[in-house]
Image (tube, coloured by chain):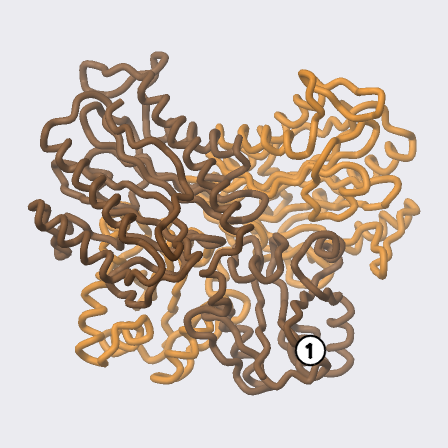
Chain colours: A brown, B orange
Amino acid sequence: MKEQLLYAASDVSADMLYFSGVLIPDPFLAFSYQGRRIGVLSMLEINRARKSSALDGILSLEALRQEAKEVFGSSEVMAIVRLLKKRYAIEAFEVGYDFPAGLYAAVSQVMPAPAIAMGGLFKERAIKTPEALVAIKQANVAAAAGIHAAKECLRAARIAVDGTLELSGRTVTSEFVRSRIAQACLEHGAVAQNTIVACGDAACDPHERGSGPLYAHKFIIIDVFPRMESSGYYGDMSRTVIKGSPSSEQERLYQTVYSAQKMAIAALRAGAIPQKLQESVNDYFIENQYFTQKEAAPEGFIHSLGHGLGLALHESPSVSLSNQQPMLENNVVTIEPGLYYPGLGAVRIEDVLCVTAQEALLLSECPYDAVL
Amino acid sequence: MKEQLLYAASDVSADMLYFSGVLIPDPFLAFSYQGRRIGVLSMLEINRARKSSALDGILSLEALRQEAKEVFGSSEVMAIVRLLKKRYAIEAFEVGYDFPAGLYAAVSQVMPAPAIAMGGLFKERAIKTPEALVAIKQANVAAAAGIHAAKECLRAARIAVDGTLELSGRTVTSEFVRSRIAQACLEHGAVAQNTIVACGDAACDPHERGSGPLYAHKFIIIDVFPRMESSGYYGDMSRTVIKGSPSSEQERLYQTVYSAQKMAIAALRAGAIPQKLQESVNDYFIENQYFTQKEAAPEGFIHSLGHGLGLALHESPSVSLSNQQPMLENNVVTIEPGLYYPGLGAVRIEDVLCVTAQEALLLSECPYDAVL
């Protein structure tokens, strides 16, 4: 029987946070033993972990170091793993894809190489518990507050003669709006990093964060993915807006993406095949004369329809052409079709949904008003 | 000749950010080839990376996937690594300790196992460039602004009869002060996560973030480590304060830690041995009757004197008993002695320094006034 072995900081590793339930800034060891979760913590962390963590057992790093030194002549992490294997009579370890290769190679010298858990060490992370659903919803409340703050700021701005936006005598920039969003998220207990506020052609690069002045009469994509400080769960929402008057071409682009999103959400339920969901959206765009090409200068619908969301921003299941596994109850995914045409601009609309047997429940609430 | 191989998201991997110079949210491949830095980027990132990155060459992930499929019948990352090895006639790869074990194991099936670069893939990261020094200083300006905001908030508060603090009719909590700090950092372009605002015995756990009401006449440790959104560099500063009147015992504790920090900073220069620096501080504390014990209920000076700081919050060189390597010019480290005594409370004072041949230059500036 294989036992799971982890070595990571739970501040950055979603698997480690899931397993240990406590935010620790430096890498530490943890392992499963007959269904129990055991952590190896230094004296800097041990009290904190005893007070609040998901661990069933906590061992002292310093004591294990000492013992490993006596038994194997080394106090390195590898020697501690060796000691644990011996003490608990563990036949073999299983590690995640992201387990550090340095430690993997070192332990493989003194025991059979750990198995790599393909498809993730904790596949059950994709099936959200009620607590996870609440936490993701909270994170989306923060995201919606961020988007609301951005809209308020754009609404209050006036259009200058050169098409830039002015608020209290200052030019409104991506950076300024991003900072307003971060502040609003903070007030809801969440940290928003790398928020996208991208205008015009800049938004045609889906991951471009945007910089400099925002302009009237052009699409502005606002994509906010805050992380709750308390739980580590993420939210993720996008809205696209225009300050000023959209052209009929812009209106049609917006409506097409909006309808595609509603269509995909309506089709999302347990048993739905992600590949088919994306194919339907692809087809819908083509029917509406919005074509995609992915060569030299990509344009159209150039990314996945969505992705799993939880303790990681991007996790299983993906909602893309490459995923043919049926959606399961309590999967949480984003649905975020987008169309990108340099010259015309870009529209992306993104919400977070929980899959049930009958339908998909919105875990994010935020108006779709696009013209400010 | 070995070439370096990386597979990570530069948003979270300091090595990848150092190598690529562009913030990318999902894992991607990058490798060195005859001194050049080459990245493999998807169509979602390629334009952004072309505009601003440290990469000398950028390959299309989609094109390589296609070719790997044709040549090896697989479009997985492992097959792409195999393709690159062949195309560039690379003899062997070298990877960092944190390289994903899943990919390490997969490529080891089709080529000699990559070497693990012990002591880090980019040892030169410990020698800061002028740009890095500027960025770290900026991050510490944000940290100082955060600490200033916290102090202002405590200064303005009044002491209630039960010893809690009140501001505008609300009890001042760790959470509230933390949010003020985050806001101030944000205004300086930095994201402060997991900030410590811990009062009384809570602060005796060095990594305890603190929660609930803050109290008068007790030490409050404020530890802020913001990351610049633009560069990814970290700052890191701690101050300890008291709202109200310190006892003579508290005053002596504070002064001893303060003097120890100044002493360690005065001894910090190129050639100084970290082990000796920490030993001197240990001795100084003992001379002053502040004893340390690390067993069941640790107290005294229970952590390292400092750590390297840069694109990672904790990096080489450590300033601890286990490091006997002389400090080098342009190392950047924290110096943060602390004393922790449940009952009496805890004091930690932390600054960031750049090592030069003659002395250590402060990269953080913030007053040491402790009584508010």
Give the SS element for disc 1: helix
Query: Where residue B99 appears, x then y in whole percent?
Result: 45, 68
**Amino acid type shown at disc 1:** Leu
Q: Residue at x 80, y 41 (%)?
A: B346
**Pointer 1: what residue?**
A84
Q: Nearer the viewer, residue A365 or B23?
A: A365
Q: Residue at x 60, y 47 (%)?
A: B355
In this rendering, is residue A335 above or below B4? above
Q: Callout 1: residue from which chain?
A: A
Left or right relative to A232: residue B282? right
In this rendering, is residue B55 above or below B144? below
Q: Residue at x 83, y 59 (%)?
A: B294
Query: Where residue B21 appears, x then y in whole percent?
Result: 37, 51
State the quadrant of the N terminus of chain B. bottom left
In this rendering, is residue A275 above or below B228? below
Left or right relative to B368: residue A211? left
Query: Where residue A86 appears, x then y in whole percent?
Result: 70, 84
| Residue B47 seen by the camera | yes
